[in-house]
Image (cartoon, coloured by chain):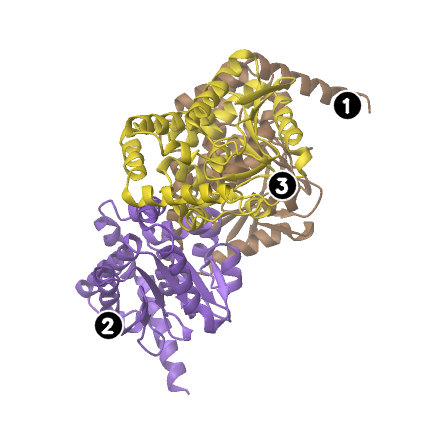
Chain colours: A brown, B yellow, C purple
Amino acid sequence: MIQTIEHGPVRELRLDRPPANALSPELIVALRQAVEVAPREGARALVLSGAPRRFSGGLDVPLLLTLDRRAMDAVWRDFYGLLRALAASTVPIAAAITGHAPAGGTVLALFCDWRIVAAGDWAIGLNEVQVGLPLPPVIYRALQRLVGPRQAGRLALEGVLISPVEAASIGLVDEVVPPDQVVESAVAWCQKLLAVPQGALALTRREARAELVGFFGSDLSSELQEVSAAWWADETQRVLRGLVERLAQKKSSK
Amino acid sequence: MIQTIEHGPVRELRLDRPPANALSPELIVALRQAVEVAPREGARALVLSGAPRRFSGGLDVPLLLTLDRRAMDAVWRDFYGLLRALAASTVPIAAAITGHAPAGGTVLALFCDWRIVAAGDWAIGLNEVQVGLPLPPVIYRALQRLVGPRQAGRLALEGVLISPVEAASIGLVDEVVPPDQVVESAVAWCQKLLAVPQGALALTRREARAELVGFFGSDLSSELQEVSAAWWADETQRVLRGLVERLAQKKSSK
Amino acid sequence: MIQTIEHGPVRELRLDRPPANALSPELIVALRQAVEVAPREGARALVLSGAPRRFSGGLDVPLLLTLDRRAMDAVWRDFYGLLRALAASTVPIAAAITGHAPAGGTVLALFCDWRIVAAGDWAIGLNEVQVGLPLPPVIYRALQRLVGPRQAGRLALEGVLISPVEAASIGLVDEVVPPDQVVESAVAWCQKLLAVPQGALALTRREARAELVGFFGSDLSSELQEVSAAWWADETQRVLRGLVERLAQKKSSK
């Protein structure tokens, strides 16, 4: 589900779960492990990428709707664990957003160090609220850290999906490059950081990431309980199941 | 002093205290009550508007200067209560800034969810310091939340009044529209939020507003004492009374 | 080492330590004293300027490398004391960035109220990491306060030096003016603040600076120990000594 490609000291973790790189429980756990193990295996920086036109479609809702409460609670815990692993990574991580990145796709990028997106007509943003899911607080804070309270409110409350160019204009992503250069640009960004004295970089980066890592510093079990309760709320289940039905009908009508 | 106009589930509260919609003690109390009572009466979102060319002239200084210390302390307490009611509203509030909004006029908008301003040559900004009033801390923080520490410092220390276009360029307002569309644009913004699943919206909005609501979370009585002391400082009284005299002379010379 | 030039109530402190206005231990102490004594001597605002084309080259690394640990610890303590004096100044301070301001040069400006830079091909930014020095936490926070977490991360981790125009575009400086107008523009900014009621200004400015001053509110001795340890780290010493050697060779080859 994850291809590992070495670019010298920079390791690319390429999401590989067709068709849309949706995040299944297994992919969430595997990605967390891949992020945590990389520095121990000698990677000095990471690039998180996806397929051309498909970075990640976010949580695999049709699959998750088949889970019971206990299994779904584990998914949320693991997803938070993945976000924490990205935030607290001891090596820099650049997101190479190769295509569509709605909801969970954009969420992954929020917790990386740098976000480079392929030019194109991709959907980027936090549209959780549109599908009935409140944006979890730790994700809201990471969003607000990047784009400020005003844009964070707009993006999260309206649940809009925006283009790479608009995302760059408000700081939700950092660079827009031609699609065939998105991975190499992310690798180049990593190499730029690897060219500076590494002790100085590590301490400065610790400071730069302190707020983001701090979001995970307190006990999040009550937050996870709220996130779980929201998932099982009648409204949320109805909207999510309606969404999945429409997707299924679309598929079967082809 | 306040017209109530229903746009389906969106209730418009239109300030109606000619000539300038200046905030009298009664209007402050009435607006707070109108904001707090609206959700209980079925309003699912609010638009705060004013008269064409006059959103609100801010505190009614000539009137307030006739009050003694006890009455003036009550005004500040009520004004803080109004700002808290706007911040903590359980339904979204869009400001439809129909015209001039100096000082207190802009302050009201800071605590709403979204700010749409009529295109035109209106004065927007926090010019309190120019008339001898220090910007109260809770208002400074709300300003800084929207525009960041750098612009907040500039606006508050210089006490400049700026145009709608400049206000939009620094994030002090969110949209500039033709004057005859400002109310309908604010209603449309509310309707956009009412179209998403409401449970998800409410929880996400709670997170989006947490910092703003938090400004009122601690005991503000010592802050209110400082605000009161500043109002009665010799410098402030001299500047305010000079201002009122000049306004009176201008009127009588017409 | 510091010229004092009075512009009415505005006192200009002009760094005068040729050739590059590098910060020696003596200049650091002298500048702190000059900032602290100015209000007591009647100055109502300050302008911090440098030489044409040379605002300040930052810490005088060749000189500091001759110091032992005890002396170097004192330098860091004094430098923090200088930054605190700038942050906590009871009178407004405008930086008139007359030319190059790498590393420590830009750091001084971060703690002022306003930053006006001469148009030109000057190097501005926090390139500490490039020369092996982690950016001290208090400086990182001041940087982040001005430009936000996203740009702060980029500037500090990449250690890039940027032009005045780019610095203005991200909020690292506030105005770019022709070189022969940089000091008078800074004086004019001060005069603008001196024209508003001063009691109201002082209280509003206290609020505007509260976060910045607060960075120095907790006990910073453990932070200073970390900063000292970083200075004496093998990597840092090697990079700094390499830098000084290259500078010496460049000089002797002329």
Dot 2: within a 10 Å radius of its alpha carbon, few (fewer than 14), some, or many (20 or more) residues?
few
Chain letter of mark 1 equals: A
| Amino acid on which the number 1 mark rests in the picture | Lys
Residue at point 40% right, 53% down? Answer: C143
Q: Position of residue A39 (x, y in %)?
A: 44, 46
| Image marks 2 and 1: residues in contact by CB distance under 8 Å | no
Select label 1 or label 3 by which is in front: 1
Q: Position of residue B118 (x, y in %)?
A: 62, 38
Q: Quadrant of residue B12?
A: top right
Q: Chain of mark 2?
A: C
Amino acid type of disc 3?
Gly
Q: Horizontally, is A216 left or right of A237 in the view?
A: left
The disc label shown at residue A50, or none:
3
Q: Residue placed at 50% from the left, 29% from the top?
A: A79
Q: Where does the C terminus of chain A fall, quadrant-wise? A: top right
- Taking the image as shown, residue A109 lies to the left or right of residue C223, namely right
User: Could you tell me if residue A198 is visible in this image?
Assistant: no
Residue C1's x, y, as percent? Answer: 27, 74
Query: Residue at the front extreme?
Result: B253
Query: To which residue does mark 2 refer?
Result: C66
Alpha carbon distance from label 2 to label 1: 74 Å
In the drawing, what numbered circle is on residue A126? none
The span from disc 1 to disc 3 (Cα, nearest Å) is 24 Å
User: Residue A250, labelled with which disc?
Assistant: 1
Q: Secondary structure at mark 1?
A: helix
Labels 2 and 1 positioned on one and the same chain: no
Q: Earlier in the sequence, mark 1 or mark 3?
A: 3
| Numbered-mark total | 3
Q: Dot 3, how many residues are within 10 Å of its Cα: few (below 14), some (14-19), or many (20+)?
A: many
